[in-house]
Amino acid sequence: MTEPPAPHPPSPDHEPTAGGGAGARRSGSGAAARAARAARATASAVLIVLTCILVPVALLAVWVEDIALDTDRYVSTVAPLATEPAIQDAAVHRITEAVGARVDGPQVASDIATWLQSQGLPPRAADALKGLGPQIDSAVNQAVTKIATRVVESDLFATTWRTANRAAHQAVVHALTGEGRGAVGVSDGEVTLNVGTAVDEVKKELVDAGLKPAEKIPDVDKQLVLFHSDQLAKARKGAHLLDIVGNWFPVIVVVLGALGVFLARHRRRALARTALGAAFACLVVAVALVVARRYYLDHLPPQVQSKAAAAAVFDTLLRFLKVSLRTAVVLGVVIALGAYLVGPGRLPVAVRGASENTADSAARWAAAHHVRAGRAGTWALAYRRGLTLAALLVIALVFALWNHPTVLTILLLVVVLLAVLAVLALLAASGRTEREATRPAPGPSAD
């Protein structure tokens, strides 16, 4: 018997077998799939982090565009300052300075004593009269302060304040974008209010009261410094950029967040993390505003006459921004909680199970008392998921179109959504109960 010929060694350009080719292709496709998943995960993470960072920036953009640049809203914001005690005290002090500086008590006493001496008044009595100069100064200052306080606390000052601030809205625009001008001036980092109207009113009342020297009060610097910041010029640049972006910025941020959640592998978890991350970012900015307020008040320059007035103006101008930040924090927590409750965790499953059992019990009780939902129950049972999604979309649309939503707005919409979901659960339970009641009983077996 002859031996079989030895197999020839494969040549270097030997083609792989069909099985080997399929394995290589599977290996290549698996690597490509893993690379694609990694790319999607990376893109999702980047978009979610970017969204969390940009949410407070978007709120700032809305504040600049919609609050600071809306005249009616601005006037309604600053109008209460006219009755703020700190603002009134600062205005009285500034008006008293502007008026009282032009009434020289010693000079008035000297003039009177000289005239009386020329009419025969003894020199000793004239000297005694000249010594009344400080008392005249004090009396004039008291009279000016009393009249200035009455003017500032009157409706005239409140009306003047609102009128001036309506025109002053142009100066707020000027402070943030470099455009506009009004009774509130912005120059070299200082925000000032012209109190000339109040000074003129005090001057008129002094003259009417018989204080003739008040007629000589000339036009003086009547600017009340309300706010001072060396960084105002830098803030203008950022505000101008935000003004250009305007109300489109929040839409862009929402789209980025939605895209990040869509690309995530576990979208429910990604939604919860995005909401919590955005809420945390807004909380950090809110805390930063508190720190910035304290730092600003502790480093007020000499140009600011009243620390309390500066604090009142600071708080008033940033009030709506703080409300927006609190609203964003609460909204993020609500969305994260909703995403958790629809998940597979033990507590969410228990909560949903208890809700379904409660709805079924209510439906059986209603059926026993001949209260039925009819076709509405059957329809709700068949399309419950679609109806729930539609309710969520409607609530989201209402929130998006709500003019300046607050924490109370969120709580109201959450209550409405829970009520709608409860009604759908009851209708679906009623439809399920009716279906079970009309189901034919099993017949006898063929045996």
Image: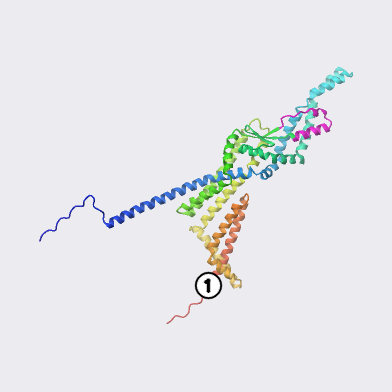
Please tell me which residue is depicted at 60% across the width and 32% down the height of the picture.
230
Q: Which residue is mark 1?
A: 436
Q: Quadrant of residue 192?
A: top right
How far from the left and from the top, in percent, is residue 20?
28, 55
246 with respect to 263 (left or right): right
245 with respect to 105 (left or right): left
**Quadrant the N terminus occupies:** bottom left
**Image vertical order of residue 339 relative to residue 229, above or below:** below
Amino acid type, residue under disc 1 in the picture: Glu
369 with respect to 40 (left or right): right
Question: Looking at the image, which residue sits at the far left?
Answer: 1
How far from the left and from the top, in percent, is residue 131?
81, 22
**Image vertical order of residue 12 relative to residue 191, above or below:** below
Q: Which residues are magenta?
A: 197-222
Q: Is residue 298 magenta?
A: no
The front one of 152 and 340 is 152
How far from the left and from the top, in percent, is residue 174?
63, 37
Please tell me which residue is depicted at 84% across the width and 31% down the height of the picture.
210
Q: Is residue 200 magenta?
A: yes
